[in-house]
Image (cartoon, rainbow, N blue to C red):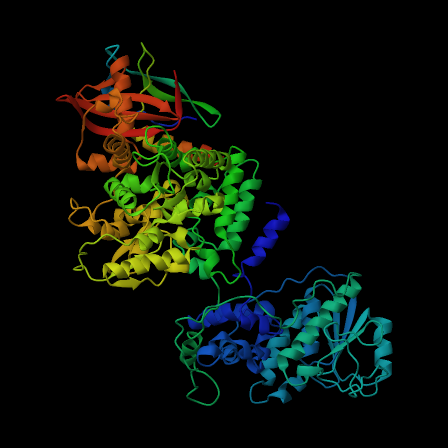
Amino acid sequence: MDQQSLRELEKRCIQEQPPECVAACPIHVDARAFVGHMQNGAWDRAWKVLRATMPFPGILGRICDGPCLARCKRGQAGDPIQIHRLEAVCVAHPAPRHRVMPLPSKGLSVAVAGSGLSSLTVAWDLSRKGYAVTLFEPGDRIGQTLISLAPEKISREIVEGETAILESLKVVVKTNVRIDTNDFIDDCLDHFDALYLGLDAIAGDAWNLDWDAGGAIAVTPKLQTTGMDRVFAGGTHGDASVSPVWRCVQGRWAATSLDRMLQKVSMTAGREKEGPHATRLYTSMDNVEPAPMVVPKVGDHYSDEEARKEAARCLACECLECVKVCRYLEAFGGYPKTYAREIYNNAAIVMGERKANRLINSCSLCGLCEAVCPNDFAMQDLCLEARRDMVARGKMPPSAHDFALQDMAFANSDRFALARHAPGTAASSHLFFPGCQLCASSPRQVTQVYDYLREKMTGGVALMLGCCGAPAHWAGQAALFSEELARWEAQWIGLGRPKPIMACSTCLRVFKDQLPEAGAVSLWEVLETTGIPDGDVDLSNGPLAVHDPCTTRGEPAVQAVVRRLLDQTGVPIEELTLGRDKTECCGFGGLMQAANPELSREVADRRGKLSGSDFVAYCAMCRDNLAAVGKRTLHLLDLLFPDPQVADPAGRPRPGWSRRRENRLRLKAELCRSLWDEKSVDDRCDHEAIELHMDADVEALLDSRRILKEDIRLVIAHAQADGSRFRHKKSGHFLAVFRPYHATFWFEYTPEGDGFRVHNAYAHRMEVLGP
Amino acid sequence: MKYDNVQPEDLNWRCERCDCDLVVGPVAATYMNNRFSTELPYCPMCKAVLIVERVAMGKMAEVEQILEDK
């Protein structure tokens, strides 16, 4: 990813766009933050927010007419937040201490005429920038026009208190000056580098300036230039004639123009976001209860308590649509825009820690973020691209995906993989591909379904066992993924291109995307055509909540057919709030489970809690991942092809990694024996005959460490052959070690009967070379 | 890279094949093209190195993680 693509991507995430109130405010007061502090009664903090953008908050805060209100989102569910009233409450509290650090003197001087809001703003903005400002006032004290604007709100004390700061900024105030003459302008231009005319406080009828058709002094909007060189003006045009904040902003724009002119830089560049503008921030109004504004008990002014209550109605507008529905996005403390930057930096780093590896590898690639994002930000594309890049540059942490890739290699080895026409046939119109995980989880149902399909379909149904290659795809192993697909395709062509029937929605997704010419269909669509087996379904457990696998997000037809099949079984169903195109991953997808098992469990747990009802899933991994956190979950096949040996299929625990492997070995052996009367190539190696005994807690520990019984048997076989092992002086336990591939396995055991008692096992990736 | 990863109880393990107690000394290890040395117990005869569970699941896992993210 280059800088430009990063910026394009960042732009799509709108979380950092300003809320409506801030965008609507001519001077962009951070009203969201301000109201947040008001809610907590944090008057000082609220004050500081105002002061960050507002000149003289003690004055403007009392008289602002709140143009932001018209765009406040709260207004769509009740009344807009009374931000202007809250400002008045805030500034009635004493101002927190505050020091202004002006920039060093620029050696340039500016004359400001009048002491209305626009002129005071110019004086405030420019004196802080290091200009020598002189304020010319026709009356004997500054701010008189402000007081007459709203005498009930602005007193002489307030004006003096607020403008005292100008003194510390060395603003020179000259009162009783005759301003309304052409001589004044000429004089100023002789003695100063530029002049600002505050039309909100002075009429200026005698000035020899350009006049517009409406009879007002002609001022270029936003630039605030007049027809005369070095003379700027503001304070009457448009809204500024009635709105205090508009007067203020015209002064601010004039100050910016004046500064740029005197600094000899472009007066116009990069000023698009000045003044009210549109914002792309999206804020969902779903589940927002209407709430009317707090009405002041006395007069027009809120009490502190009323202000806090009013502020509490604020929606604190933000998007976070994706973060709200994704535990993964939430877990890393940011949102897609910040993540895009972190992921970009992760790749750009030369020396030091790659802090985003875990962020990149934990995404389930489920695409829910894209489905809910108003701008289709696809975190899964970003993460997958980053993974591929890491793999290509040799920077992928081996611990993230090794186990899953080993499992895939096993599934596609001779020990499990198989491609056959049905017994006694030499051609097939269809092909059943159960996928690797259904075989690992529920091998008996694979046999049942295959028997059923052969019975119901004419033209021959071939069988293929193996893995579709999705783990390689998810791991960012593009070359390996292509290899796995090519192998699959070759076998499929060898079988005469039968139409593949997929029991797993991940396989279906993979082949629809990668090998569309195969015309893969879902098992569920096929079962609707053949009809489902007769049988009674146990309805005693109440309605089932349908969990759609995340890989069916783009498959509404499959999601619909599953519901029709459920309907045929007679079992009542319930829809989850996040279902169908908005479904969530179970925590397995994208190898989240491999790279971040703790997060995977959290995701599954949160998903399971969406409904108190038992779930029905139609992906073996979803079923098992949900079952692993104690969520009672059925597989659709448990309803269609109930296994008489399983009394409570929803409560069936997730088979551990060792069991999953054994299930697949056994399935192949059994199918070979019963259907083709052959021995499976791997009907048991010598070391597989080694008998292991272990308690349930040891078994669970090994499963969490992803150590297979197969690994342990390798260690024992090695230790037996080689004689190398340690023995504990006190317990008498043996400790053997073996490094069959890029992991070292340790196994603590004692002989027991014909086999061994497993006390412990652990592994590490680091290779110990020796003393 | 050196850390305190040998505890007295680790020396309750003996080399079964050579029938001798373990000694502690510098041992070379490698991961992701990084090579380093650390104190670990090993058999003075056959040089087999002992990694106890505490070290494998603790320090070693930590260092692996750091090197993976480097």
Residue A606 visible at all: no
Determine whether, in the image, residue A345 is placed left or right of residue A237: left
Determine whether, in the image, residue A732 is placed left or right of residue A390: left
The one nearer the camera, A166 or A553, is: A553
List x then y, in percent, for residue A441.
27, 41
List x then y, in percent, for residue A51.
57, 69
Dividing the picture into quadrants, the one containing residue A260 is bottom right
**Is residue A23 positioned above or below B41 on the image?**
below
Determine whether, in the image, residue B54 is placed left or right of residue A6: left
Quarter holding the N terminus of chain A? top right
**Is residue A93 positioned above or below B29 on the image?**
below
Q: Residue at x 52, y 47 (%)?
A: A342
The one nearer the camera, A250 or A485, is: A485
Determine whether, in the image, residue A494 is placed left or right of residue A51: left
List x then y, in percent, for residue A398.
43, 33
Dividing the picture into quadrants, the one containing residue A291 is bottom left
The one nearer the camera, A640 or B45, is: A640
